[in-house]
Image (tube, grey):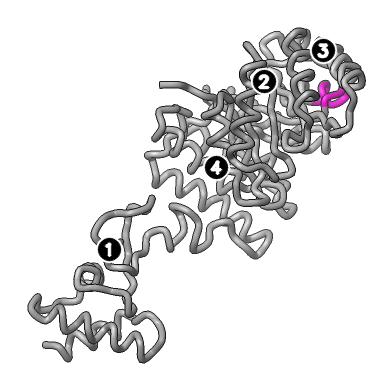
Protein backbone atom coordinates (compact mmCIF):
# COMPACT_ATOMS: atom_id res chain seq x y z
CA UNK A 1 0.00 0.00 0.00
CA UNK A 2 1.34 3.42 -0.95
CA UNK A 3 2.01 5.73 2.03
CA UNK A 4 1.75 9.52 1.87
CA UNK A 5 2.42 12.32 4.37
CA UNK A 6 -0.55 14.16 5.87
CA UNK A 7 -0.32 17.81 6.96
CA UNK A 8 -3.25 19.04 9.03
CA UNK A 9 -3.50 22.81 8.52
CA UNK A 10 -6.53 23.36 10.76
CA UNK A 11 -4.69 25.85 12.96
CA UNK A 12 -2.77 27.97 10.46
CA UNK A 13 -5.21 27.88 7.55
CA UNK A 14 -8.15 27.92 9.97
CA UNK A 15 -7.17 31.36 11.24
CA UNK A 16 -7.68 32.63 7.70
CA UNK A 17 -11.36 31.62 7.87
CA UNK A 18 -13.33 34.78 8.69
CA UNK A 19 -10.61 35.86 11.13
CA UNK A 20 -11.07 32.95 13.55
CA UNK A 21 -8.41 32.90 16.30
CA UNK A 22 -7.28 29.80 18.17
CA UNK A 23 -5.97 30.31 21.70
CA UNK A 24 -2.91 28.45 22.95
CA UNK A 25 -5.09 26.01 24.90
CA UNK A 26 -7.26 25.38 21.86
CA UNK A 27 -4.19 24.75 19.71
CA UNK A 28 -2.86 22.28 22.27
CA UNK A 29 -6.18 20.42 22.21
CA UNK A 30 -6.15 20.38 18.40
CA UNK A 31 -2.57 19.06 18.45
CA UNK A 32 -3.65 16.28 20.83
CA UNK A 33 -6.53 15.32 18.52
CA UNK A 34 -4.11 15.20 15.60
CA UNK A 35 -1.65 13.04 17.50
CA UNK A 36 -4.36 10.62 18.60
CA UNK A 37 -5.69 10.32 15.04
CA UNK A 38 -2.32 9.66 13.39
CA UNK A 39 -1.67 12.98 11.61
CA UNK A 40 1.95 13.28 10.45
CA UNK A 41 2.44 17.06 10.63
CA UNK A 42 0.61 19.87 12.42
CA UNK A 43 1.01 23.24 10.74
CA UNK A 44 0.77 25.19 13.97
CA UNK A 45 0.81 28.82 12.89
CA UNK A 46 2.54 31.76 11.24
CA UNK A 47 5.27 32.88 13.70
CA UNK A 48 6.42 36.01 11.85
CA UNK A 49 2.97 37.57 12.26
CA UNK A 50 3.65 38.45 15.92
CA UNK A 51 6.02 37.44 18.75
CA UNK A 52 3.09 35.89 20.66
CA UNK A 53 2.22 33.81 17.60
CA UNK A 54 5.80 32.57 17.53
CA UNK A 55 5.57 31.79 21.27
CA UNK A 56 2.43 29.70 20.72
CA UNK A 57 4.13 27.66 18.00
CA UNK A 58 7.07 27.08 20.35
CA UNK A 59 4.65 25.94 23.06
CA UNK A 60 3.22 23.32 20.72
CA UNK A 61 6.73 22.15 19.77
CA UNK A 62 7.65 21.81 23.45
CA UNK A 63 4.36 20.09 24.30
CA UNK A 64 4.85 17.49 21.56
CA UNK A 65 8.45 16.87 22.62
CA UNK A 66 7.72 16.56 26.33
CA UNK A 67 4.97 14.01 25.71
CA UNK A 68 6.87 12.00 23.14
CA UNK A 69 4.34 12.64 20.38
CA UNK A 70 4.94 11.15 16.97
CA UNK A 71 3.42 14.16 15.22
CA UNK A 72 5.82 16.80 13.89
CA UNK A 73 5.06 20.48 14.42
CA UNK A 74 5.54 22.83 11.48
CA UNK A 75 4.95 26.51 10.81
CA UNK A 76 4.72 28.74 7.75
CA UNK A 77 6.60 31.90 6.79
CA UNK A 78 7.78 33.92 3.83
CA UNK A 79 10.76 32.62 1.92
CA UNK A 80 13.28 35.16 3.12
CA UNK A 81 15.88 35.33 5.86
CA UNK A 82 14.06 37.30 8.61
CA UNK A 83 11.15 34.84 8.59
CA UNK A 84 13.54 31.88 8.44
CA UNK A 85 15.23 33.05 11.65
CA UNK A 86 11.88 33.38 13.43
CA UNK A 87 10.78 29.93 12.25
CA UNK A 88 14.00 28.28 13.42
CA UNK A 89 13.79 29.98 16.82
CA UNK A 90 10.46 28.25 17.51
CA UNK A 91 12.25 24.89 17.50
CA UNK A 92 10.37 23.40 14.55
CA UNK A 93 12.09 20.93 12.28
CA UNK A 94 9.47 21.17 9.53
CA UNK A 95 10.01 24.62 8.03
CA UNK A 96 7.36 25.70 5.55
CA UNK A 97 7.92 28.68 3.26
CA UNK A 98 5.67 30.32 0.68
CA UNK A 99 6.70 32.33 -2.36
CA UNK A 100 4.44 34.21 -4.77
CA UNK A 101 5.42 34.09 -8.43
CA UNK A 102 3.31 36.36 -10.67
CA UNK A 103 2.14 34.54 -13.82
CA UNK A 104 4.11 36.92 -16.02
CA UNK A 105 7.43 36.16 -14.30
CA UNK A 106 10.04 35.57 -17.01
CA UNK A 107 12.32 32.55 -16.89
CA UNK A 108 15.40 34.64 -16.08
CA UNK A 109 13.55 36.45 -13.32
CA UNK A 110 12.41 33.09 -12.05
CA UNK A 111 15.97 31.83 -11.87
CA UNK A 112 17.03 34.99 -10.04
CA UNK A 113 14.19 34.60 -7.54
CA UNK A 114 15.07 31.00 -6.76
CA UNK A 115 18.75 31.84 -6.44
CA UNK A 116 17.78 34.17 -3.60
CA UNK A 117 16.49 31.13 -1.75
CA UNK A 118 19.98 29.68 -1.42
CA UNK A 119 21.11 31.73 1.62
CA UNK A 120 17.71 31.18 3.27
CA UNK A 121 17.97 27.42 2.84
CA UNK A 122 21.65 27.40 3.88
CA UNK A 123 20.73 29.23 7.08
CA UNK A 124 17.98 26.76 7.96
CA UNK A 125 20.06 23.67 7.19
CA UNK A 126 23.00 25.04 9.22
CA UNK A 127 20.81 25.97 12.19
CA UNK A 128 18.70 22.80 11.99
CA UNK A 129 20.54 20.02 10.13
CA UNK A 130 17.50 17.76 10.56
CA UNK A 131 15.13 20.31 9.01
CA UNK A 132 12.60 19.29 6.37
CA UNK A 133 11.96 22.31 4.16
CA UNK A 134 8.78 22.85 2.17
CA UNK A 135 8.19 25.63 -0.35
CA UNK A 136 4.72 26.62 -1.56
CA UNK A 137 4.90 28.29 -4.97
CA UNK A 138 1.76 30.32 -5.60
CA UNK A 139 -0.41 29.74 -7.64
CA UNK A 140 -0.58 26.43 -9.56
CA UNK A 141 -3.80 27.27 -11.38
CA UNK A 142 -2.36 30.46 -12.88
CA UNK A 143 1.31 29.54 -13.33
CA UNK A 144 2.29 28.89 -16.97
CA UNK A 145 3.53 25.35 -17.54
CA UNK A 146 6.98 26.40 -18.79
CA UNK A 147 7.46 28.55 -15.69
CA UNK A 148 6.49 25.65 -13.43
CA UNK A 149 8.82 23.25 -15.26
CA UNK A 150 11.72 25.69 -14.99
CA UNK A 151 11.10 26.22 -11.28
CA UNK A 152 11.00 22.50 -10.54
CA UNK A 153 14.25 21.90 -12.39
CA UNK A 154 16.02 24.71 -10.52
CA UNK A 155 14.78 23.54 -7.13
CA UNK A 156 15.63 19.91 -7.84
CA UNK A 157 19.06 20.62 -9.28
CA UNK A 158 20.15 22.64 -6.23
CA UNK A 159 18.27 20.50 -3.68
CA UNK A 160 16.81 23.68 -2.26
CA UNK A 161 13.75 22.08 -0.70
CA UNK A 162 12.50 18.65 0.33
CA UNK A 163 8.85 19.33 -0.48
CA UNK A 164 7.40 21.44 -3.29
CA UNK A 165 3.87 22.51 -2.38
CA UNK A 166 1.69 23.35 -5.38
CA UNK A 167 -1.43 25.19 -4.20
CA UNK A 168 -4.46 25.95 -6.31
CA UNK A 169 -4.65 29.15 -4.30
CA UNK A 170 -7.34 30.72 -6.45
CA UNK A 171 -9.51 27.61 -6.29
CA UNK A 172 -10.15 27.68 -10.02
CA UNK A 173 -8.99 24.24 -11.13
CA UNK A 174 -11.04 21.17 -12.02
CA UNK A 175 -9.96 17.63 -10.98
CA UNK A 176 -8.72 16.71 -14.47
CA UNK A 177 -6.58 19.87 -14.59
CA UNK A 178 -5.07 19.08 -11.20
CA UNK A 179 -4.41 15.51 -12.33
CA UNK A 180 -2.52 16.72 -15.40
CA UNK A 181 -0.53 19.44 -13.64
CA UNK A 182 0.46 17.41 -10.58
CA UNK A 183 1.28 14.35 -12.66
CA UNK A 184 3.62 16.42 -14.81
CA UNK A 185 5.21 18.09 -11.77
CA UNK A 186 5.72 14.81 -9.90
CA UNK A 187 7.44 13.29 -12.93
CA UNK A 188 9.92 16.19 -13.01
CA UNK A 189 10.46 16.47 -9.25
CA UNK A 190 12.60 13.36 -8.73
CA UNK A 191 13.45 12.94 -5.03
CA UNK A 192 11.65 16.18 -4.16
CA UNK A 193 8.16 15.35 -2.87
CA UNK A 194 5.23 17.22 -4.40
CA UNK A 195 2.51 18.40 -2.02
CA UNK A 196 -1.07 19.26 -2.97
CA UNK A 197 -3.01 22.16 -1.42
CA UNK A 198 -6.39 23.01 -2.98
CA UNK A 199 -8.85 25.81 -2.25
CA UNK A 200 -12.59 25.32 -2.35
CA UNK A 201 -13.94 28.36 -4.19
CA UNK A 202 -15.71 26.15 -6.74
CA UNK A 203 -16.38 23.28 -4.33
CA UNK A 204 -13.61 21.11 -5.80
CA UNK A 205 -10.98 21.19 -3.04
CA UNK A 206 -11.40 17.69 -1.65
CA UNK A 207 -11.83 16.13 -5.10
CA UNK A 208 -8.82 18.06 -6.41
CA UNK A 209 -6.74 16.99 -3.40
CA UNK A 210 -7.57 13.34 -4.02
CA UNK A 211 -6.75 13.67 -7.72
CA UNK A 212 -3.44 15.34 -6.89
CA UNK A 213 -2.40 12.40 -4.73
CA UNK A 214 -3.55 9.88 -7.34
CA UNK A 215 -1.47 11.80 -9.90
CA UNK A 216 1.71 11.36 -7.86
CA UNK A 217 1.81 13.96 -5.08
CA UNK A 218 3.27 12.48 -1.90
CA UNK A 219 2.06 15.07 0.63
CA UNK A 220 -1.53 16.09 1.36
CA UNK A 221 -2.48 19.44 2.93
CA UNK A 222 -6.02 19.50 4.41
CA UNK A 223 -7.99 20.64 7.47
CA UNK A 224 -10.99 19.88 9.66
CA UNK A 225 -14.16 20.56 7.64
CA UNK A 226 -11.84 22.14 5.07
CA UNK A 227 -11.55 25.28 7.24
CA UNK A 228 -9.39 27.91 5.57
CA UNK A 229 -9.18 31.10 3.53
CA UNK A 230 -12.45 32.06 1.79
CA UNK A 231 -14.34 28.77 1.20
CA UNK A 232 -11.51 26.76 2.70
CA UNK A 233 -9.37 23.86 1.48
CA UNK A 234 -9.63 20.06 1.21
CA UNK A 235 -11.33 18.16 4.03
CA UNK A 236 -9.15 16.04 6.33
CA UNK A 237 -11.55 13.15 6.87
CA UNK A 238 -13.04 12.93 3.38
CA UNK A 239 -9.74 12.92 1.52
CA UNK A 240 -8.03 10.41 3.82
CA UNK A 241 -11.03 8.08 3.72
CA UNK A 242 -11.39 8.20 -0.06
CA UNK A 243 -7.66 7.65 -0.54
CA UNK A 244 -7.66 4.70 1.89
CA UNK A 245 -10.51 3.14 -0.09
CA UNK A 246 -8.23 3.34 -3.14
CA UNK A 247 -5.22 1.77 -1.46
CA UNK A 248 -3.34 4.93 -0.41
CA UNK A 249 -2.57 5.14 3.30
CA UNK A 250 -2.33 8.45 5.15
CA UNK A 251 -1.97 7.04 8.65
CA UNK A 252 -5.06 9.01 9.67
CA UNK A 253 -7.46 6.95 11.81
CA UNK A 254 -10.56 7.69 9.75
CA UNK A 255 -12.21 4.50 11.07
CA UNK A 256 -12.25 6.00 14.58
CA UNK A 257 -15.33 7.97 13.62
CA UNK A 258 -16.32 8.94 17.18
CA UNK A 259 -12.97 10.58 17.85
CA UNK A 260 -12.97 12.23 14.43
CA UNK A 261 -16.44 13.61 15.14
CA UNK A 262 -15.25 14.91 18.53
CA UNK A 263 -12.35 16.69 16.80
CA UNK A 264 -14.65 18.18 14.15
CA UNK A 265 -17.19 19.31 16.73
CA UNK A 266 -14.46 20.88 18.89
CA UNK A 267 -13.33 23.06 15.98
CA UNK A 268 -16.93 23.69 14.93
CA UNK A 269 -17.80 25.00 18.42
CA UNK A 270 -14.90 27.47 18.31
CA UNK A 271 -15.93 28.76 14.89
CA UNK A 272 -19.59 28.97 15.86
CA UNK A 273 -18.76 30.95 19.01
CA UNK A 274 -16.58 33.45 17.16
CA UNK A 275 -18.50 33.88 13.90
CA UNK A 276 -22.07 32.90 14.73
CA UNK A 277 -21.97 30.16 12.08
CA UNK A 278 -20.57 26.67 12.37
CA UNK A 279 -18.71 24.59 9.82
CA UNK A 280 -21.00 21.57 10.24
CA UNK A 281 -24.44 22.07 8.70
CA UNK A 282 -27.25 19.78 7.61
CA UNK A 283 -25.66 18.83 4.28
CA UNK A 284 -22.07 18.39 5.55
CA UNK A 285 -20.83 15.00 4.29
CA UNK A 286 -20.72 12.30 7.00
CA UNK A 287 -21.09 14.65 9.98
CA UNK A 288 -24.20 16.59 8.94
CA UNK A 289 -27.65 15.36 9.90
CA UNK A 290 -28.85 15.01 6.31
CA UNK A 291 -26.10 12.48 5.53
CA UNK A 292 -27.95 9.91 7.62
CA UNK A 293 -31.53 10.49 6.49
CA UNK A 294 -33.59 8.69 3.85
CA UNK A 295 -36.94 9.59 2.30
CA UNK A 296 -37.25 7.52 -0.88
CA UNK A 297 -38.15 3.89 -0.30
CA UNK A 298 -35.34 2.43 -2.41
CA UNK A 299 -32.76 4.29 -0.31
CA UNK A 300 -34.08 2.69 2.87
CA UNK A 301 -33.39 -0.83 1.63
CA UNK A 302 -29.61 -0.53 1.88
CA UNK A 303 -27.09 1.67 3.71
CA UNK A 304 -26.28 4.19 1.01
CA UNK A 305 -23.84 7.06 1.45
CA UNK A 306 -21.27 7.54 4.19
CA UNK A 307 -23.70 7.71 7.10
CA UNK A 308 -23.61 4.97 9.75
CA UNK A 309 -26.73 5.81 11.83
CA UNK A 310 -29.63 6.02 9.36
CA UNK A 311 -32.74 8.05 10.08
CA UNK A 312 -35.95 8.32 8.05
CA UNK A 313 -38.54 10.94 7.13
CA UNK A 314 -42.03 10.25 5.81
CA UNK A 315 -43.73 12.14 3.01
CA UNK A 316 -45.59 11.14 -0.16
CA UNK A 317 -42.48 9.36 -1.51
CA UNK A 318 -42.42 6.69 1.19
CA UNK A 319 -43.17 3.00 0.67
CA UNK A 320 -44.04 0.13 2.99
CA UNK A 321 -40.39 -0.75 3.60
CA UNK A 322 -39.40 2.76 4.65
CA UNK A 323 -42.53 3.20 6.81
CA UNK A 324 -41.73 -0.04 8.61
CA UNK A 325 -38.17 1.15 9.32
CA UNK A 326 -39.50 4.52 10.50
CA UNK A 327 -41.95 2.90 12.91
CA UNK A 328 -39.25 0.61 14.26
CA UNK A 329 -36.81 3.51 14.63
CA UNK A 330 -39.37 5.55 16.61
CA UNK A 331 -40.56 2.55 18.66
CA UNK A 332 -44.10 2.83 17.30
CA UNK A 333 -45.87 -0.54 17.62
CA UNK A 334 -48.06 -1.65 14.70
CA UNK A 335 -49.76 -4.72 13.26
CA UNK A 336 -47.83 -5.91 10.18
CA UNK A 337 -51.05 -6.52 8.24
CA UNK A 338 -51.95 -2.84 8.70
CA UNK A 339 -48.69 -1.59 7.13
CA UNK A 340 -50.11 -0.90 3.62
CA UNK A 341 -52.99 1.11 5.12
CA UNK A 342 -50.59 3.04 7.36
CA UNK A 343 -48.40 3.85 4.36
CA UNK A 344 -51.39 5.03 2.32
CA UNK A 345 -52.56 7.25 5.20
CA UNK A 346 -49.07 8.71 5.63
CA UNK A 347 -48.94 9.60 1.94
CA UNK A 348 -52.41 11.19 2.04
CA UNK A 349 -51.69 13.29 5.12
CA UNK A 350 -48.34 14.40 3.71
CA UNK A 351 -50.07 15.61 0.53
CA UNK A 352 -52.75 17.43 2.54
CA UNK A 353 -50.21 19.18 4.77
CA UNK A 354 -47.63 19.66 1.97
CA UNK A 355 -44.77 18.60 4.22
CA UNK A 356 -43.20 15.62 5.93
CA UNK A 357 -45.01 14.19 8.96
CA UNK A 358 -43.97 14.40 12.59
CA UNK A 359 -43.63 11.30 14.79
CA UNK A 360 -46.73 12.40 16.72
CA UNK A 361 -48.75 12.51 13.50
CA UNK A 362 -47.50 9.08 12.46
CA UNK A 363 -48.42 7.66 15.89
CA UNK A 364 -51.91 9.08 15.45
CA UNK A 365 -52.24 7.36 12.05
CA UNK A 366 -51.11 4.03 13.53
CA UNK A 367 -53.62 4.31 16.40
CA UNK A 368 -56.49 4.88 13.94
CA UNK A 369 -55.36 1.88 11.88
CA UNK A 370 -55.58 -0.51 14.85
The C terminus lies in quadrant: bottom left
Q: Secondary structure at mark 3?
A: helix
Number of marks in picture: 4
Q: Residue 278, percent across and down?
A: 59, 60
Q: Which mark is residue 298?
A: 1
Q: Nearer the viewer, mark 4 or mark 3?
A: 4
Taking the image as drawn, is residue 126 in sight? yes
Label 4 neighbour load within 10 Å: few <14, some 14-19, many 20+: many
* Residue that badge 3 annotates: 123
Q: Say whether marks 4 and 3 touch (CB < 8 Å).
A: no
* Residue that badge 4 annotates: 207
Q: Secondary structure at mark 1?
A: helix
Give the main secondary structure, helix, strand or loop, of the magenta stretch: helix
Q: Secondary structure at mark 4?
A: helix
Q: Who comes first in sequence, dot 4 or dot 3?
A: 3
Q: Who comes first in sequence, dot 3 or dot 2?
A: 3
Q: How far is the residue under mark 2 from the one under mark 4? A: 21 Å
Label 2 neighbour load within 10 Å: few <14, some 14-19, many 20+: many
Amino acid sequence: MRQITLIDQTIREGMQFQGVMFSCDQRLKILEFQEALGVDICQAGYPSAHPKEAAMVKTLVDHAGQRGFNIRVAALGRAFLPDAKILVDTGITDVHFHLHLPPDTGLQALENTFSQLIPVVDFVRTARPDAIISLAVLDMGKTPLNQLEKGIRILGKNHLVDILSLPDTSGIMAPNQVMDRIGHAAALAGDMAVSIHCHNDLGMASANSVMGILAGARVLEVSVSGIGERNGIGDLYLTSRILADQGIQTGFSHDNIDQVREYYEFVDDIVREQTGQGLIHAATPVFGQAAHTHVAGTHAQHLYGAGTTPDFHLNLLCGNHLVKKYLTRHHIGFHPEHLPAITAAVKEMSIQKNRRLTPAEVRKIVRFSD
